[in-house]
Image (cartoon, grey):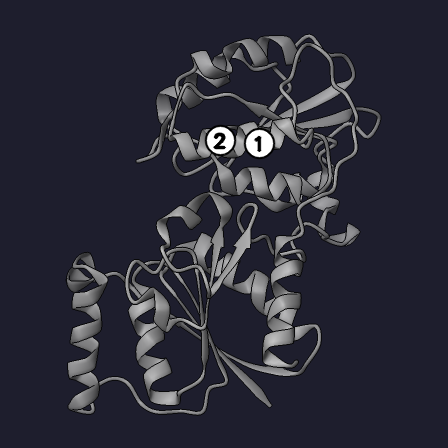
Amino acid sequence: MFKILVITDTKLSSINQCNSVVNELTSSKKINLQYIKIKKSFFHFFPNSFIYLKLLIQLFFGLGIKKQRIDLIISCGRIAAPYNLIFKKINNCTNLHILNPYFKKNEFSKIIIPQHDSSKFFNKHNLILTRGTLVDRKKINLKKKQLLNISKLFNENFKIVLFLIGGNGKSSKIVFADLKETIQKINQEKKIEIVYCFSRRTPQSLKNNILKSKKKRSLVFPDNFYNPYWELINIADYIFVTADSISMTSDALSTGKPTYIIPVSKIKSKIKNFQINLNKDKITRIYNKKLDKWSYKKLEESKLVGNKLKQILKL
């Protein structure tokens, strides 16, 4: 039996990206899975080279890490990368990391990285490039019975317009002025149900302004810790995404549904260019008083990555 070890930090995004790859591989072969989640401690704030050295010392003295048979290691998250290399050292197996491992890049069999981040890599021989982030295809193809509860909240005769709202971070800052005009215009559309879904990065001031400006019937999530993010993506007819979030843009474009991008004034150039290129390729649009339907080739990055790995691993 083929054995895969998955190593992540505790971020849900890291776990989801690993699972998107795992699910592609398990479709072709019976696989034994083991997960290790690295909880961030004091020494994880140090560079990966320091974490790796500490793990090597532990390995030398036989502390903490035990040898086991592993065929493939998949990791995601900065602090997961040194653990990946230690387990590879023990097992001499294929290993891959999702996103930038920030050190010893040539020691990974493959690194899965978005195109807009590939400039950080001098040697590109072991890269698998994606257009956006990896998306678990199981989550964008939920079954009808999984959508019953959320569907009951909406008028079946109306179209559902979903707003995915990002927030502030190292690479972006959203202010209400970025969304105000779009919300005012969408409120004038007829026979639609509008729902807003906030991210963990959405500042409270932005939430408050959206709550004041939204239509009375419009729903807002999370609601008392209930966040039907994937269910909403599945039932939405139109999706609006703030330009700061590459991950939410990737989620939306993996559905093939009409996706409008809401420009954000303060974002990193690489994110801005990512969104500009999608618009140039006529994949996304900017909303202007009318909801349209258009076709584009949806993103299937997980499928493409999975197919490449199956060839490499001979699965």
Crowd tier of the residue under label 1, counting other residues whose Cα lies within 10 Å: few below 14, some 14–19, many 20 or above: few
Identify the residue under disc 2. 273
- In x, y percent, where is residue 112? 49, 59
Judged left or right of residue 120, residue 153 is right
**Dot 2 and dot 1 residues touching (CB under 8 Å):** yes
Name the residue: 45% across, 73% down.
109
Residue nearest the observer in this picture, 52 or 11: 52
Q: Secondary structure at mark 1?
A: helix
Identify the residue under disc 1. 277
Query: Where is the C terminus found, in terms of image quarters?
Result: bottom right
Residue nearest the observer in this picture, 151 or 64: 64
Judged left or right of residue 116, residue 78 is left
Crowd tier of the residue under label 2, counting other residues whose Cα lies within 10 Å: few below 14, some 14–19, many 20 or above: few
Name the residue: 31% across, 73% down.
83
- In x, y percent, where is residue 312? 59, 76
Q: Does 90 sit above or below residue 296?
A: below
